[in-house]
Image: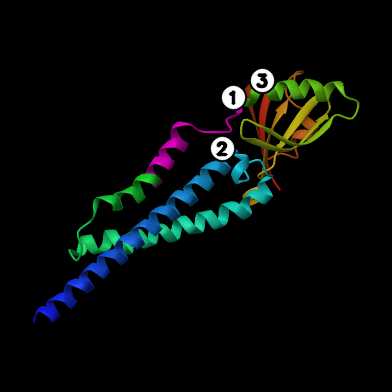
Amino acid sequence: MKNAEGRTSSRLQNGRRRKVVIDLCVLVATLLSVAVLLGLYYGWPMVGGDLQYDRQIFIAMPAFLVLVVAGLLWVLHCLWPSILGRRTWPWWSAATPAVALSAFLVVVLFPWGRFDEARPQLETIAHEVLAEPEGVRSGVKIRGLDISRVAHHGGAVYFIEADNSFGTTRGWIYSPDGSPDPEGQRYFGSIEHLGGPWYEFERSS
């Protein structure tokens, strides 16, 4: 009788250990993937945040897949058994969704790559490009904005964003002489005046 109780107790302890190990693995996977994704978003060189967009995607996709798998494991291993009443929800299991939620709030409260913050530096580059006979720049990164190409045409400077996902090219135009050349506007799907000499454009790639 005592041997049977001992074996039962041993199985329960082993089961608890496995559950704790799974919880810790899910938490570590969540922490690592969130750290990588935040690093790419905020341009941290240690995780490849200073790379071109087309290279960052090869880092972001595996990290995102790890985060998705960790989330599914957390739901199946922690949340769903608790809903069915098969397992109590240990307090440390709340760390996984807390990490993901904290990362989301950080991105919402502290967005990166806003045009308004980068405008002074972009304007400096625009003046430099206009002063050069063949003013062309490539691979420009400012305040999280990834600019693939900077070039002037007809007295205006065009900043073309590197991210052309979903078949759309976006960017900004510095046009101190007013609205950009009407002849050039036909190549853009839309142009919006942002105030002063700045315009934002969008077109299908």
Q: Which mark is residue 42?
A: 2
Q: Residues within 10 Å of mark 1 (few under 14, many from 20)?
A: few
Q: Which mark is residue 93?
A: none
Q: Which mark is residue 116?
A: 1
Dot 1 falls on a residue whose secondary structure is: helix
In the image, taking residue 68 as reference, residue 123 lies left or right, namely: right
Disc 3 residue type (three-letter): Pro
In the image, taking residue 140 as reference, residue 9 lies left or right, namely: left
Disc 1 residue type (three-letter): Asp
Residue lying at the far right in this picture: please name it.
133
Image coords of residue 111 (percent x, y): 51, 33
Q: Label 3, on which residue?
A: 120
Spatial CA span between label 3 and label 2 = 19 Å
Q: Which residues are magenta?
A: 100-117
Q: Are marks 3 and 2 in contact (CB under 8 Å)?
A: no
In the image, taking residue 64 as reference, residue 198 lies left or right, namely: right
Q: Nearer the viewer, residue 114 or 67?
A: 67
In the image, taking residue 79 as reference, residue 181 lies left or right, namely: right
